[in-house]
Amino acid sequence: MTKKILVTGGAGYIGSHTCLLLLEAGFEVVVVDNLCNSSLESLRRVEKLTNQFIRFYKVDLTDFDSLSKVFDDHTFHSVIHFAGLKAVGESAEIPLHYYEQNIGSTINLLKVMQANNCKRFVFSSSATVYGDPASVPITEDFPISATNPYGRTKLFIEEILRDQSKADKDWQIVLLRYFNPVGAHKSGMIGEDPQGIPNNLMPFISQVAVGKRDKLSVFGDDYDTPDGTGVRDYIHVLDLADAHVKSVQKIDQFRGVTTLNLGTGKGVSVLEMVKAFEKGSRKSVAYQIVDRRPGDIAECWADPAKALEVLGWNAKLGLEAMIEDTWRWQSNNPLGYEPSE
C-alpha cells in the first residue's frame, strides 16, 4: 500500500521540492499550508512536473479543529513539518507572533498526531540552533543556543520533541538541521520565491542579476575569514529534499530522536558566492559593503558525516549546479510565481 505523507508548509520553497521528490519516490502527498509566505502555484507546477495529484488543504496549524479534520480524512504514515515563519530580523521585531506561529502551531500538530496515533515526525530545524559556534565544522553534539527569536523557536521545538519522545517511547523523530538552502529544480519551474525583500543571500544576488534590485548589501567585511565576509555552508535544495525522503523511508529503523546536520561540509564566503554567480549567470552583481548585522556570525559550516552514516545521504550538487539552477529559475520567473502579465 502506498504510504501517505503529510507535508506542512508544503507549498513553500523546501516543501515544494520535497513534495516533488516524495511523489517521484512513490509516496502519496497531502499538503497543509496557510499560504502566508508561499504560493499554491508551486504545487500546481509540482503536479505538472510529476503528472501526479497533491491533495491540498488551506489550513493554519494554529487552528486545531481544521487540522483535526485533515487527520479525519487521511491515515498518515508520517509527517514532515516545514510550516513556520523564518525571517530573522522580523522575529526580533514581533517575537510573540513568531512564538505563537512556530511553537504554538507545532504543539497543535503534535497533539493532533498523538490523538490519531501518528508518531513518525521529521522536523525542519536549522543550524541557527548552534548560535555562534566555538569552532567549525559543526557536529550534532555541539552545544545549542540561539541569537534571535526565530532561532529560539527552532531550539524550543527541538526541546519539546525531545521531551515528548522521553514521555512516549513510540515516537520516532528526526531533527534535520539545515545549513543554507539554495538552488532550484532543474526544470526552472519551481524555486525560491521570497515575499518582499529577500532575507537570504542567493535570492538577493539573483534578484540583482535579473534587474529586480539595484545592489546587494554585504553585511561586514571585517570578519576573521579569508576575505573578511561571512562564510556559510550552502546546500542545494534538491539535496536537502532528498534527505527528507530518505528520512521517511528509514524512519522505522530509528527510535527516539535522531538529529542530523544537512550541509556540504564546505564553507563559501559572501564575496566568493557573488563572483561565482557572476561567472555562472554572465551578469554583473553590484554590491556595497555595509555594517555588520547584529547576531551574524563569522563562519558556520557542517560536519555532515552522521547523515551519511545514518541515512546513507550526502550532498551531491556543488556550487556550480546551485548557481546554474538558481539562475534558470530566476531568469524564467523574474517575478517568482506571480504571473508576468
Image: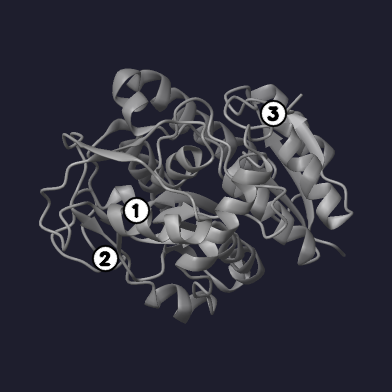
Image quadrant of residue 114? top right
Q: CA distance from mark 2 to mark 3?
A: 38 Å
Q: Which residue is mark 1?
A: 127
- Looking at the rendered structure, the secondary structure element under dot 3 is loop
Find residue 321 and report its horizontal and vertical position in percent.
54, 66
Find residue 315 and report its horizontal and vertical position in percent.
49, 72
Q: Disc 2 marks which amino acid?
A: Ile
Which residue does the image show at 43% across and 49% down from the upper left? 125
Upstream in the sequence, badge 2 or badge 1?
Answer: 1
Query: Where 252 falls versus 182 (above or below)?
Result: below
Residues marked 2 and 1 touching at CB (< 8 Å): yes
Q: Which residue is mark 3?
A: 338
Q: Disc 1 marks which amino acid?
A: Ala
Which residue does the image show at 61% across and 65% down from the upper left? 242
The C terminus - image quarter: top right
Find residue 106 and report its horizontal and vertical position in percent.
51, 36
Query: Where 97 falls versus 168 (above or below)?
Result: above
Q: Disc 3 marks which amino acid?
A: Glu
